[in-house]
Amino acid sequence: MPLFEENDITHFRFEFRYETINANNIAYVEIIDLNTTGVVIDPTSHTVTIAQIVVPEPSGTFTPAIKTSVTINNVIGVATISTGAILTVTDGGGDLGTPSSFSAPRTFRVTAADGKHQEWTVIVQDFING
């Protein structure tokens, strides 16, 4: 079976996670998807540009107080990458899947199953919470 040689980011989104308590007084994690607009994935320049991240309005356990706590410095990036590839952080920032800052461009390396790698830059142009 041949090794996959693709090392692309094919989709990128953001979410925010917070702890809440259910009716049985048990803590659990809720996930709120953050709205992204103007997402452009450029396989030539190896960039992912997000025009805006917009925090949704409060609803249910996502209270106004929790909404206020969401910043560009504590969001979670989630990427879809090529089959068989792995993604690593190369800029010293937090790993995808953990709260991280996207206040400046972030650099990630996508390594294909055949070992070829490509650096990708993720740029957020605007963050709106309000």
Image (cartoon, rainbow, N blue to C red):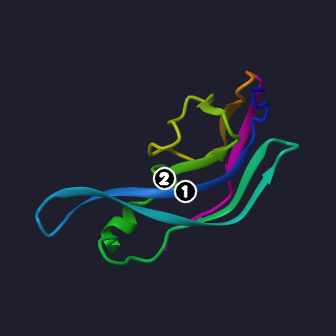
In percent of the image, x 51 and y 36: which residue is there?
95
Which residue is denoted by mark 1 in the rendering?
Answer: 14
Q: Report the amino acid beneath label 2.
A: Val
Residue 82 screen position, x and y as percent: 71, 41
Residue 88, quarter of the rendered image: top right
Q: Nearer the viewer, residue 29 or 47?
A: 29
Quick check: marks 1 and 2 in contact, CB under 8 Å? yes
Q: Residue at x 75, y 35 (%)?
A: 7
Q: Position of residue 40 (x, y in %)?
A: 77, 57
- Element under label 2? loop
Q: Nearer the viewer, mark 1 or mark 2?
A: 1
Q: Is residue 64 left or right of residue 13?
A: left
User: Magenta residues, as a range?
Assistant: 116-130
Q: Which residue is mark 2?
A: 75
Q: Position of residue 89 (x, y in %)?
A: 59, 31
Quarter of the image containing the N terminus?
top right
